[in-house]
Every structure is written in C-alpha cells, then in structure tokens.
Amino acid sequence: MAPHADDSKGFPLASGPAATSELFEVSSPNVVYTDNEIKSKYTYRTTSVTKGNDGKFVAVPKETVYDFKVDRKIPKTGVMLVGWGGNNGTTVTAGILANRRGLTWETKTGEQAANYYGSVLMSSTTKLGTDANTGEDVNIPFHQMLPMLHPNDLAIGGWDISGMNLAEAMDRAQVLEPTLKQMVRKELAAMKPLPSIYYPDFIAANQEDRADNLLPGSKACWEHVEEIRKNIRDFKAANNLEKVIVQWTANTERFADLIEGVNDTAENLIEAIKSGHEEVSPSTVFAVACILDKVPFINGSPQNTFVPGAVALAEKHDAFIGGDDFKSGQTKMKSALVDFLINAGIKLTSIASYNHLGNNDGKNLSSQKQFRSKEISKSNVVDDMVAANNVLYKEGEHPDHCVVIKYMPAVGDDKRALDEYYAEIFMGGHQTISLFNVCEDSLLASPLIIDLVLVTEMMTRIQWKNTSDSKDYSGFHSVLSVLSYMLKAPLTPPGTPVVNALAKQRAALTNIFRACVGLEPESDMTLEHKLFA
Ligand SMILES: NC(=O)c1ccc[n+]([C@@H]2O[C@H](COP(=O)([O-])OP(=O)(O)OC[C@H]3O[C@@H](n4cnc5c(N)ncnc54)[C@H](O)[C@@H]3O)[C@@H](O)[C@H]2O)c1
Ligand SMILES: O=P([O-])([O-])O[C@@H]1[C@@H](O)[C@H](O)[C@@H](O)[C@H](O)[C@@H]1O
C-alpha cells in the first residue's frame, strides 16, 4: 500500500532505510572507527606566499593538523520545500517517489526506469585510490565516500502560495511523462502544500492569480516566523524525524535593499520583522525562522535572501545556510567551458548568453525586477576565473558578458540556452564557440535539490578541531560554501573568496570528504605511472 501523507505530515519515510553499508575502510594510524564515529587526524598542506622587497615571491610550505569527527549514524531526515507546488518541487517529489518504488514506465522510446541522473552524489564516482596490484584507478560512487543519507529515505513536505495538491501541480508543471504521472498520482494527490507568506512586491505581479493558499499578512511580521517554526516542528514530529532541511525553490524575488538599521545586523533584522518593515522579503523570513531553530536553510533562487543581518544571525546561532541559485544548465556549462578556455591560455573576450523558457519561472522572470536578480547571479560566474589569469587579463579587464532571458510559453520547461563564446587565440586569430543547449530545467534542477540536501545533512555530522588546540570540536562555518558546485552564485563566509570554476568546486567537495576519513586530496599526479613503468 503506497504511503499516504497529509498537509502537516508531508510525504512519509520509506519503509526502512535504503542506505547501504559503508563500502570501504581506511587502514591508517590516523583513522579510528567506532560504532558511532570515524575520527581522523588530517594534515592540511598549503603554500603560504609572500613577496620580497625585490618583488620576488617566496613560497613557504605550511602544515596544519586537524582532527575530524564524522557521526556515522544516518538520521531520519526530511526536506521541506518552499515552493513545493512548483515545477521543481513537484518534479523532485515525483522523482524520489519513483526511485523509492523502483518504478519503470512506458515512453515513446521504450521502457524508462527511475534514476538519479544529474545528481553528483548519486550518479557520479570519485577515485578512492589505485589498485595495490594492478595500479588501476579504483573509483567508487560519490555517495559512498562518507556514510550519507539516501534520497529514497527522505520525508518531503513544504509550502506554496498556490493551494493545488501535488498531483494537480505536477500536471500544471507539464514536466513528467503521463505514464509516470499516472503511477505517482495517487500519492501526490494526498500531498497539499502548507499555506505560505506572500508579500506581492517581491515577486512578479503575474504570480498573483496562483496565490490562493496564504497566511494572513502581506508584509513581514513575527507571527509569520513563529508559524513557519511551528510548521517545521509539526512536520518533524509527524514523520518522527531527527532532522529537517528547508530549501527555497519558490519564485525568484527582487533584491531587497540593504538598509542600515534594518537588515545590517542580526538584532536589527529581528526588530525589522517585528515592526513589519516592508523591505524584509518572504525568503528572508523563512531563513530567519529556520536559523532560530538551527534548521539548515538553502536558497535555490538568485535573490539576496541572506542580507547581512541574516548571515550574522546564522553565525550567532551556529545555523547552516547556503545558496544562491541552483546551477542547472546554461551556467553550469559556462562555468566549465570558461574554466577550460582561460586555463588553456585562450583569451575569452565576449560571452553572449541568451535563453528563453516557457515555464512559470520564466513568467516570473519576465518582470524586470525579478529578472535583475537572475541576471546578477548568471553574470558573476566567470569573475574568479578571469581574475586568476593576469597573463591574459590586465587588472580590471574582463570579457563582455550579456545575459538575456525571454519568456516564451510554447517551450514550457524545456529552456533553450543559446550561447556564443568569442576568444582571441594565437597571433591575432579568433575562436567562436556557439552552443544551442536545450535544458529541461526542472529535470536538471531536481537532482541539485537532492544533492544540496545530502551534502547539507552530511555537513551537520562533521566536526573539526585544530589538533594543537585543546578546545572542543566545532562544526564548519555557518555559510556552507562547500555547496558551491550546485549553485550559480555561491554564498561564502564574509570576506572569503568566491570560487565558480566548476572543477575546483567539485575538487573541494571531494577532498573535504576525503579529509574526513584521513585521506590525502586526489591530485591526479599518478607519479607511479610517470616515474617508472
Ligand atoms: N533549472 C531550474 O529550474 C532552476 C535553476 C536555477 C534556479 N531556479 C529557481 O528555482 C525556483 C523555482 O523554479 P521553478 O521552475 O520550480 O518555478 P515555479 O514557478 O514552477 O515554482 C515556484 C513555486 O513557488 C511558489 N511560490 C512563490 N512565492 C512563494 C512563497 N512566498 N512561499 C511559498 N511558495 C511560493 C509558486 O506558487 C510556485 O509554485 C525559481 O526561483 C527559479 O529561478 C530554477
Ligand atoms: O542554471 P541555468 O540554466 O544557468 O539558469 C537558468 C536560467 O537559464 C533560466 O532562465 C531560469 O529560468 C532558471 O531558473 C535557471 O536560473
């Protein structure tokens, strides 16, 4: 009998965890396994560079020894989506249900089985090491690097300003095959998003016609914070959960003005909400509600949810936050291609990025203020790669870069991304790369929602301390920049650099997980294959 859900309960857990036992153990004097923990001593090696009076760099190898501790017990976890009734929300919910039940369905090209393609954790591998006998690479599923939650075990719930149940909303989204929809319709029909907060000025006016599932009040108030906190507590209790993670996959909001005395500090932000300040957005109200109860909050949209006061509040409460803006298709390709071109010594001089899409996201983005949020997140993605190459680019020099998004209802969720990359090459030559990339937006974004939940939940079970310190273990910084691989505009701890290069982002995630079990970073040097045969 398929599991049933109701408003506050969301979508209950599967019967029994799908997670498999751990695939490997590290045999090292620096790694200790107990029933509940993996403890490791990890030497972090970096190179500290200074510039001498003669202008010459001096590079000094540095070593810092850290103790890492990983909780091996995988908690019963739920995810609550803000915007649950949207294209992404309905698609990821149906996708997890289909995987949990091992569904196959007929399509025009034959039978299709449920999968987690597009999830870096569930469908990619990472190199563990080399075979002691053959010297061949030994690659394992990324998901097996640490004792990680399995998406099949997730309870799912959430909020939407639209009161449609998930089956009707799935039809409205027009993303999934009718044959698959038919197989999950009954379960989704039993799921209804919780009423949400709606402050009209923050999203396009064209969204008003779906706003029929609202909490009273059209601007920030403390009752909204308390109601959201209660919703999360009720969902956790109803599903007998140990942990809940909240993700914003609701409409893109306009940027909030940063106002001293309103959203510049934690205290001012709390006061601004209590006094009903109109510059506090719904996404910031959700973030504050989550932070106060140390519920991790991830922003999958481009708006500046995390105003300085929200970041400060998260740091104050040791709560995890992450964002911004899922990196699903056009930008993911850009962050890989630009990384390749510039690191190949090719001088990229112009990027023209156009896309059109016909889903409700595109409808909301047809409004200038909401588009501006997206334009910013899509435009900044090359900055670090350009700045890192002072051979090609002088100080302050960068490629021309334009971003255009047009709402074309006919194409629905199947966004068309058209890009032209123009570059200078050897001796005055030029290279022009033209891409036509059909991104089925929700089918690309849904695995990112899953990866963001899995990595965020994993980070709540990792602690560290500097071996030389006597102080206790602590968690990573509140701002989870380790999530950057899944996001267009990575949020980083205040004052730290933003890395958008896709390969670097993936390497950071891989090597932090490796460090947690006392393994060196994967360097791909393979000296064993270069020094001797
Ligand atoms: N590939 C992708 O789909 C992709 C990539 C990057 C970012 N995003 C972002 O993800 C978000 C969702 O994308 P989508 O295609 O699912 O859009 P969508 O419009 O289909 O879904 C958004 C949902 O949010 C709801 N909503 C709006 N304001 C709300 C509020 N205050 N509280 C609760 N619900 C609210 C809407 O009713 C709608 O159901 C958008 O902001 C989009 O820009 C999507
Ligand atoms: O992730 P990506 O494909 O570069 O960017 C996408 C944009 O191209 C699209 O216009 C927008 O609707 C999506 O929300 C997403 O942001």
Image (spheres, rainbow, N blue to C red):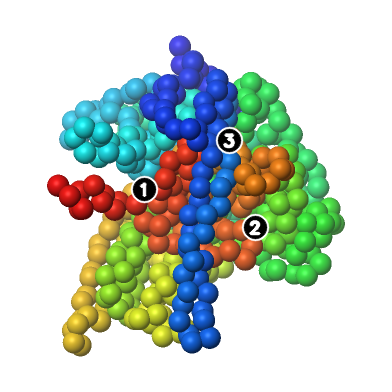
Residue found at the far top of this picture = 1
Q: At x 25% / y 81%, what residue is drawn?
A: 424
Horizontal side of 386 relative to 294 (left or right) equals left
Pointer 1 residue: 522
Q: Secondary structure at mark 3?
A: strand
Q: CA distance from mark 1 to mark 3?
A: 20 Å
Q: Nearer the viewer, residue 16 or 2?
A: 16
Kindly tell me whether mark 1's CB lies below 8 Å from ligand 2.
no
Label 1, secondary structure: give it.
loop
Q: Residue 245: x and y, percent?
A: 60, 38
The Cα–Cα distance between marks 2 and 3, rounded to whole angstroms, is: 29 Å
Query: In the rendered structure, which disc, 2 or 3, sits on the residue that comes first in sequence?
Result: 3
Q: Please name the amino acid that badge 2 sits on.
A: Phe
Marking on residue 333: none
Say few, some or many: other residues with alpha carbon within 10 Å of mark 2 (under 14 / 14 to 19 / 20 or more): many
Which amino acid, by three-letter code, is at mark 1? Answer: Glu
**Residue to which mark 2 is pinned:** 306
The label nearer to you, 2 versus 3, is 3
Residues under numbered marks 2 and 3 in contact, where contact means CB atoms less than 8 Å apart: no
Which residue type does callout 3 highlight?
Answer: Lys
